[in-house]
Amino acid sequence: MAILTIKDLDFSYHSPQGETKALTDINLTVNEGEFISIVGPSGCGKSTLLSIIAGLTPVAEGLSMNNATIGYMLQRDHLFEWRTIYDNVILGLEIRKLMTEENISRVKTLLGRYGLDTFADKRPSELSGGMRQRAALIRTLALNPDILLLDEPFSALDYQTRLKVSNDIGRIIKEEKKTALLVTHDLSEAISMGNRVVVLSERPGTIRKIINIDFPKSASDKELTPLERRNSPEFQEYFHELWRCFS
Amino acid sequence: MPKRFSSKRRLPSERLCISEEQRMYLSTIRRRKLEVNFIRVFILAAFIFAWELCAKLGVINDFIFSSPSRIVGCFADMCADGSLYRHVWVTLYETLLCFSLVIIIGLASAVLMWLSKSFSEVIEPYIVVLNSLPKSALAPILIVWLGNNIRTIIISAISVAVFGTILTLYTGFMETDQDKIKLIKTLGGTRWHILTKVLLPGNLAVILNTMKVNMGLSLVGVIIGEFLAANEGLGYLIIYGSQVFKLDWVMLSIIILCIMATFLYQLINLLEKLLSRNVDKSA
């Protein structure tokens, strides 16, 4: 079922120097439960697209959402040092005045499930980069959004942490059965996490190609985790296919 | 982070029996600290002693230069007739009133400027000019307009500190990480939430720093105001004492001002500790 439809979307930036066309003729249908990776050269308008979907950059037409709520994850975790981890993850609930018992117990369950319950009273600076990113994800999940927008959420992490965290985050999103759109520079990351990879062209960004990613299931009939995908033979083929789009 | 690792790695037994070198190092630090403190006290004592000696021997005229013993005598007299309490209280009261008003007006204006881009664009050049204007130039007009009273003192003291405060706070607000603001928006927050959840807590250090600067500036402003328009307060005592050649009053007032300034500064330090205790608890 389509949860988000983008139809003939155009977008331009205005500045005193003139008008810059950022996105043109974007058409994309996102189905419930899908994980879509968006890749493209720098400045092609990837982040702008997320911003538009999130409603932070208003557009007149081209976007229709099936009553879906949006959660947004930024490049850096932006956990507030003046709040504890618990106070950070309930920030959204606090802002929307949704501090119900049900929501709070859900947040506590999430903290427990993803190994942060013992850190609830700690300050962000006491956590590792990976834990911080998980806390940031729980802050987003606290509002129980239908669609998660991930704007290069791993780019501030070093390589090892990045592999591990993207594996964690990918798993959590699957477990919580969320629809997700991930913007990334990293082709491997796009393949290891997505069901489809959308390739954007240079500015003005338009969809050049959509590659369906389909890995065979594991022995126990489960979907492969991002790390397992990276180690499977199909990975290289997808990588080459994607790489060809850029050269 | 490194702090945590080091305390974890070190066993309690190791912490108890420190090495000979560490012991030497610690005792060197302790000795240095003692030396510095001793020299500090010594300089003050030597100065007071030399002053008193010169006055007693007639090297300086203690009618013009006063002397420590004369100041102590003056202090005792003024405590006895209660006039000193009155002067100290008036200056302290005016300073605290001016300080509170500067913080309130400064914060409110900075928030208004942040809320409305057009307002800040219109108002900014005025504030920049008023900030660089020597405020003592305004004092004569204020006396004419407001009269020879506490209102003139408070307003002239506020004018000394308020414009710098507005500019510092506004700059702090504008330098707040845009992504933190974006985060609040993605969580569905309004401008009110951006203000209360990010801007104010995120700028706590800036606010406390302007408070420190303002405490000093308020005192400066109040003393200037009292020079011009007052019949009580330490500033009045200084200017009146110098006019009637009661230099004991002047010297005593200056010493009390030193103590008062230190006390007020420590008050802000205490506030800083109280406010940031939550954040620092972990560090």
Image (cartoon, coloured by chain):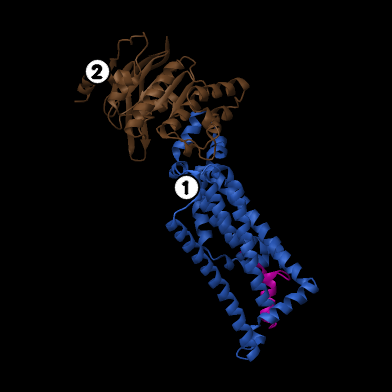
Q: Residue at x 31, y 22 (%)?
A: A190
Viewer-side residue, A176 vs B26: B26
Is residue B193 something one can see in this rendering?
A: yes
Q: Residues within 10 Å of mark 2 (few under 14, many from 20)?
A: many
Q: Residue at x 49, y 51 (%)?
A: B17
Colour seen for chain B: blue
Query: Which residues are the magenta region?
Result: B221-248
Viewer-side residue, B221 vs B13: B13
In this rendering, is residue B119 above or below A144?
below
Which residue position holds label 1? B14
Q: Which chain's residue wears label 1? A: B
Q: Quadrant of residue B22?
A: bottom left
Q: Amino acid at mark 2?
A: Tyr
Q: How far across and how far down the image is residue A197, in percent?
A: 31, 19
Q: How far across and how far down the image is residue B242, in percent?
A: 66, 80
Magenta segment main secondary structure = helix
Q: How far across and how far down the image is residue A225, in percent?
A: 35, 18
Quarter of the figure that contains the N terminus of chain B = top left
Q: Which chain's residue wears label 2? A: A
Q: Is residue B239 magenta?
A: yes
- In the picture as drawn, the residue positioned furthest to the right comes out as B81
Q: Residues within 10 Å of mark 1 (few under 14, many from 20)?
A: few
Say left or right for B112 vs B142.
Answer: left
**Which SS class for mark 1?**
helix
Q: Are marks 2 and 1 in contact (CB under 8 Å)?
A: no
- Of all chains in the rendering, the one displayed in brown is A
Instruction: Judge depth for marks 2 and 1 and give the one in front.
Output: 1
**Which SS class for mark 2?**
helix
- In the picture as drawn, the residue positioned furthest to the bottom comes out as B58
Q: Is residue A193 magenta?
A: no
Disc marking residue A238: 2
